[in-house]
Image: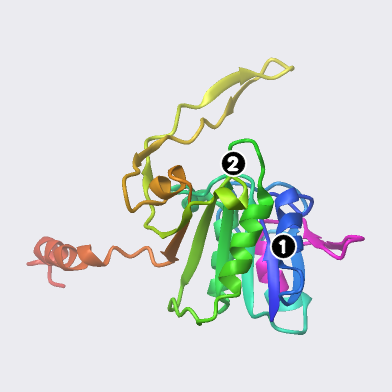
Amino acid sequence: MRILLSNDDGVHSPGLQALYDGLEGLGELEVVAPDRDHSGASNALTLNRPLTVEQHPNGFRSVDGTPTDCVHLAVNGLFSEPFDRVVSGINTHANLGDDIIYSGTVAAATEGRNLGLPAIAVSLVNDGHFHYDTAARVVRLLLEGKKTLALGPRCILNVNVPDVPWEDIAGFRVTRLGHRDRAEGAVPMTCPRGKERYWIGAAGQGSDAGPGTDFHAVSEGYVSITPVHVDMTRHEALSSLREWVDDMTSGEGH
């Protein structure tokens, strides 16, 4: 099994190294990750300039681009041998609920899925202890599963792991995405040259965070595993939308 590892925290992230160490011996591992932190990059591709790839002494490769760039290049040009799957992480912080819209970690996994590969995004619900080894063990367990999991096209697994030792993990829960409250306001500041600048405010707390959600699972010490389908169509709204459009355009000669 050939596994491509990537992330959004950068090629030197301890979470990426822990993931590599935790999966050693499971298959042939290749690492292609951004050369710096690209948290919040979502699914951005770099289309306005060529990209530079650098190989590091430990064999990891870095790209001066986004997480999506890294997976795209790795699958579509850097290697002659195909990959069997993509694993993105271990992200330094949680990717729960609405976080996945912005997450470069999830984006690297979805790019793998878009290119036809099963993919997992894994994040540590960090409380300052940095138990990356726990998250790596979770991923290994998922990859070693005896049964083949068929999620269907355009679907990945989004995994969030409590920041605790392995023996303190309460178990595993299959969850849905919760939702956050509105983010906190932008934080103004003044730069040394007297110009006004802004920091993006912190993410909101979980508003839809009850039983069954990823928020609830990790709050109770469980690993949250959420199937994420990359199809933003609101299928339930199609019928009423057709009726609305038909009513709006009736008599217009269409």
Furthest-bottom residue in view?
81
Q: Which numbered dot is residue 126?
A: 2
Q: Residue 66 appears in which quarter of the rendering?
A: bottom right
Task: Tell me the element at label 1.
Answer: helix
- In magenta, the rendered stretch is 51-74
Q: Quadrant of the C terminus?
A: bottom left
Does 146 sit left or right of 55 as displayed? left
Q: Which of the two residues, 96 or 194, is positioned nearer the viewer here? A: 96
Q: How far from the left and from the top, in percent, is residue 153?
A: 45, 78
Task: Tell me the element at label 2.
Answer: loop
Q: How far from the left and from the top, in percent, is residue 119?
A: 56, 70
Q: Residue 151 appears in which quarter of the rendering?
A: bottom left
- Residue sitting at x 75%, y 72%: 29
Furthest-front residue in view?
167
Q: Which numbered dot is residue 22?
A: 1
Q: Residue 210 appears in which quarter of the rendering?
A: top left
